[in-house]
Image (cartoon, rainbow, N blue to C red):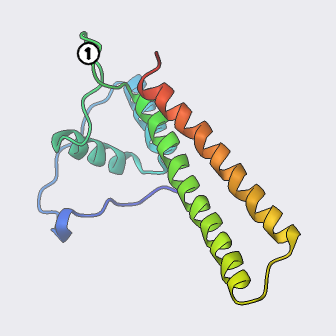
């Protein structure tokens, strides 16, 4: 997996201060490296983005004794499902574009063939079914009961 060499700066600012090295237990470093690899990020980029996300309130700290929050595995699963949702949205937009082209052809006096209509309809139904499947998976992750 290709990793990002450096993270982008906030509002284009320059790096003026560096923090010292962090001492990690070997098991901690393995977990962090695996999470960084899963996201296609370098270790340093993953640590920096994660710390900034928690500090700015974009993500809560993992669950504590009270059971609130998300653990790393849950966050990774949610990200995966949300990425699938974004890809499906793009595919549904493609299906809508195909249907618009068929309608434009029909309106201009050049009606599409029955095979083209059936293919477009089947593609749309397939993408809608996949969207429903991924949405149900997302709902199960957020509220499993």
Q: Residue 93's quadrant in the figure?
A: bottom right
Where residue 13 sits: x, y (%)? Answer: 15, 68
Q: Furthest-bottom residue in view?
A: 108
Q: Furthest-left residue in view?
A: 16
Residue at coordinates 82% horizontally, 62% vertically from top-left? Answer: 118
Q: Is residue 38 above or below residue 113?
A: above
Where residue 136 sits: x, y (%)? Answer: 55, 32
Left or right: 89, with 63 as reference point: right
Q: Is residue 81 above or below residue 29?
A: below
Q: Secondary structure at mark 1?
A: loop
Residue at coordinates 86% horizontally, 75% vertically from top-left? Answer: 113
Where residue 53 sits: x, y (%)? Answer: 24, 44
Q: Residue 61's quadrant in the figure?
A: top left
Left or right: 7, with 118 as reference point: left
Q: Which is more toward the observer, 102 or 47?
A: 102
Left or right: 131, with 32 as reference point: right
Q: Is residue 4 above or below residue 29?
A: below
Where residue 98 sits: x, y (%)? Answer: 67, 72
Q: Which residue is mark 1?
A: 64
Residue at coordinates 20% horizontally, 62% vertically from top-left? Answer: 10
Q: Furthest-top residue in view?
A: 65
């Amino acid at each position: 997996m290709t990793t990002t060499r450096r993270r982008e700066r906030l509002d284009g600012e320059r790096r003026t201060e560096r923090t010292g090295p962090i001492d990690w237990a070997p098991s901690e470093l393995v977990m962090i490296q695996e999470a960084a690899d899963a996201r296609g990020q370098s270790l340093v980029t993953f640590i920096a983005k994660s710390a900034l996300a928690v500090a700015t309130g974009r993500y809560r700290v993992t669950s504590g004794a009270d059971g609130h929050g998300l653990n790393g595995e849950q966050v990774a699963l949610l990200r995966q499902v949300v990425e699938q949702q974004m890809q499906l949205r793009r595919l549904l937009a493609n299906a809508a574009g195909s249907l618009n082209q068929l309608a434009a052809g029909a309106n201009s006096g050049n009606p599409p063939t029955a095979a083209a209509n059936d293919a477009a309809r089947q593609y749309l139904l397939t993408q809608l079914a996949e969207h429903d499947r991924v949405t149900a998976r997302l709902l199960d992750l957020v509220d499993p009961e």
